[in-house]
Amino acid sequence: MITIVPVSTPDKKLLNKEEIEAAVAIIEVINRWFQNIGLGIGSADLQVIKWPSLGYPLFSPHSLNPGFPCDQIYISMDQYTRWDQFIFQASHEFTHCVIHRLNSHENQKALWIEETICEAISLVFLQMFANSWNNCVLSQHNLTYSVAIQNYLKNQLNEVGTSKLEKCCGLEELLEINQQNADHREYRSNEMHKLFFLIKDSEDVNALVHYRDYIEPNTILLDTNKYRAAYPDLESVRYLCELQENAISKR
C-alpha cells in the first residue's frame, strides 16, 4: 500500500488539501504505469514523505533502515502544488523503489548506473505527463498545465554537464565518479540525456530497471556480455555497456 504521509518531516507541518490531492494523483499515475508494463512494486508498504529542508529527494529502503516502518520516498519541496517538480522528483525515487524491489542486493548496486537510469526515466515521465495531461485528474484544475511540464522538461534537457562519465579514464576514475555521484550530478548529465533519448518504449525501461541482475557482485561493473545478450536489440542497454567498456579500457 502506498501512503502519502499527511505531515512533513522534521517540522510536523500538515500538508494542505491541494498538496495531498496532487501527491495522490501523480503517484497513482506513476504506480499504474509501472504496473501496466509488468513492473508493479507489489503489496509491501511505501510511504511518500515531504522533507523540504533535505535538499534532494531520496528513496530510503526499509532493509537499510529497519527502524522505519517501511520503504520511504522523501520529496524535498516546500509545496507539492508545483506539479512538474513533484513529477520529476517522485518518478525518480519511485524508479529507485522499483529497482530495489526487483533486486535488493546492495552488493549489486552501482550508483553511476542507477542514478543515470532513474534520472533518464524521470524525464520519460515528464514527457508522458505532458503528452497525456488530459488523462490526469489534476487537469480538471488546470487544463493547460502540460505547457509547464514541457518547459520543465526542456529546462532539464538544457542543463549542460561535464561529460566526465563519457570521458572517464580507467576503473579508478569510474570508482571516483560512483562515490561522488550524489554531489556531482553534472558528471553524467549529458550521458543521462543521451540515455533518455534512447528509451523508446517499455522494453527499454524493463531492461534498465533490471540492471542490477547484470552487475558483478561486490563491484560497480556490469557483465556487459550478459547484459547485451539479454537485450540484444536495445540501444539503451548498448549505450550503458559502451560507457563502461570505454571507461575501463582507457588509461
Image (cartoon, helix red, strand yellow):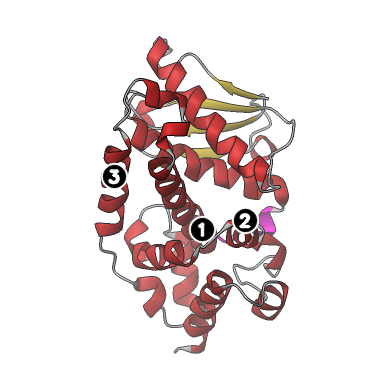
Is residue 102 a member of the stretch shown in magenta?
no
Tag 3–tag 1 contact (CB < 8 Å): no
Secondary element at image label 1: helix
Q: Hey, what amino acid is under mark 3? A: Tyr
Q: Is residue 207 left or right of residue 125?
A: right
Furthest-right residue in view?
Answer: 43
Q: Residue at x 29, y 32 (%)?
A: 144
Residues drawn in magenta: 106-110
Where residue 104 sits: x, y (%)? Answer: 71, 49
Q: Callout 1: 10 Å neighbours few (<14), some, many (20+)? A: many
Disc assigned to residue 117: 1
Q: Callout 2: 10 Å neighbours few (<14), some, many (20+)? A: many
| Residue 204 sits above or below residue 98 on the image | below
Where residue 241 sits: x, y (%)? Answer: 56, 76
Tag 3 residue: 152
Q: What is the C-alpha distance between the residues marked 3 and 2?
A: 24 Å
